[in-house]
Amino acid sequence: MLLTPCKDRRVAILDTIFVLDGSCRMTYGGAERYLILLHKLLVDLGYEPHVWQPGEMTHEVEGIRVSGLPWGTVEYSGIPVLNRQFYEQTTGYDKAIYLAPNLAFPFLRPRSVVISHGIGWDYPTHPWITACGPFKEEWYRRLQFGLIAPDLLVSVDTNTLNWIRALWPGYEERTVYIPNCVDLDAYFPVERQREKVVVLYPRRLDLGRGLDDAKIAAQIITRRHDFVEFHFVGRAMEDADEAAMHRWVEEHPRCRYYWVPMHEMPAVYREADIVLIPTRVGEGTSLSCLEAMASGKAIVCGHVGGLTDLIIDGLNGRLINVTPETLTKAIEDLILHPETRCILGQRALATAQAFSLTAWKRKWTQALRAVWGAPGS
């Protein structure tokens, strides 16, 4: 007898770009890693998730089934054609998750959950910050729809929730704070003694993530201190950007660039002394920051979004307004004061215990059952 999927267990998920068409290459950003964790949790809970994204191809990556949809053009930071195609293709699904608020307009499936990974318009040159009149009003209307129209908004940071409360009070009952998490069994500190100091940038190669600031700081500090190395570890969206980074490190002694599969990242953190999360815009409760904290490292991060949920300046890390000058000074202070590095790392480790993968799974399970009931219901 042919077995068919149980309708009530099926979950439709809409993402932006999880897999690059034609290459089966994941983009390996925080949102993509988040989807892998969430997909596994859904399967463990008895659901049958299916992911859709813009594109033409069907993929199977990390055990995740990903189908492509026509997507049209970007309008007011959203993709309404993609949204409509998703709505029509998932007829029969009564549970849906939208991986970002801008994907939720104009049609929401029944019993929908939207995830906010942080505010992404927090910089002065954002196109809709500089807009005015009816254009900005329409962008604002669509943003509001994505944040308050779903049955539940899951926010990874309190920055977004505080912003919603300030602008649209009264929607608190339809929001929940579930910060990002770290697997404490994989990420943990080890004792190590050596003369050199390794500064790690474990991020996607992106200007908004402070890449250029970190490169300038690396140039200055490696000229001043011959016992310091800078390791840039992460992928870019384009092969050309990775090739450019390889060329850059060839011209700068004691600077290295490479990337490793995610299961090898714990070893990368353990070899570091100082970790940089120098984000300028659009950050939630950074997975990289949490992994560095669980590894017991001294961290320098930007005063942006959900990073303020993780780091208190001077207590368990350094929290700065990122410029090349402030980043260089914060790194150099930690290089010259190993006892401070040790204290900040110990406190970061203690903080990370509150952001365990186990706690994240429990909070997500409670949130889904509040909206959907038990699987099959």
Image (cartoon, helix red, strand yellow):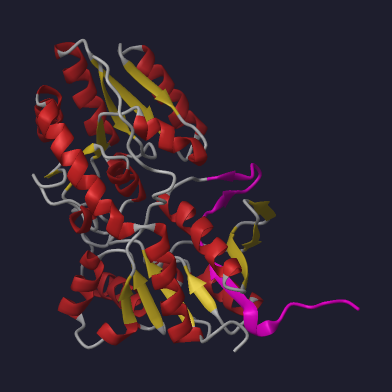
Res 193 visible: yes
Res 72 visible: no
136 displayed left or right of 46:
left
Q: Is residue 151 above or below residue 348?
A: below
Query: Which residues are drawn in magenta?
Result: 1-26
Q: Quadrant of residue 105?
A: bottom left
Q: Quadrant of the N terminus?
A: bottom right
* Residue 164: image location, x then y, percent: 23, 76
Residue appearing at x 46%, y 79% in the figure? 368
Q: Quadrant of the C terminus?
A: bottom right
**Tag count:** 0
* Residue 163: image location, x then y, percent: 19, 71
Examine the structure image and report whether residue 3 is included in the region drawn in magenta: yes
Of 41 and 146, the residue lying toward us = 41
* Residue 300: image location, x then y, percent: 19, 39
Examine the structure image and report whether residue 60 is included in the region drawn in magenta: no
**Residue most toward the right?**
1
Residue appearing at x 22%, y 54% in the figure? 310
330 displayed left or right of 194:
left
Of 367 and 223, the residue lying toward us = 367
Q: Quadrant of residue 225?
A: top left
Q: Is residue 328 above or below residue 299?
A: above
Q: Is residue 230 above or below residue 139?
A: above
**Residue most toward the front?**
191
Residue appearing at x 36%, y 39% in the figure? 203
Of 296 and 255, the residue lying toward us = 296
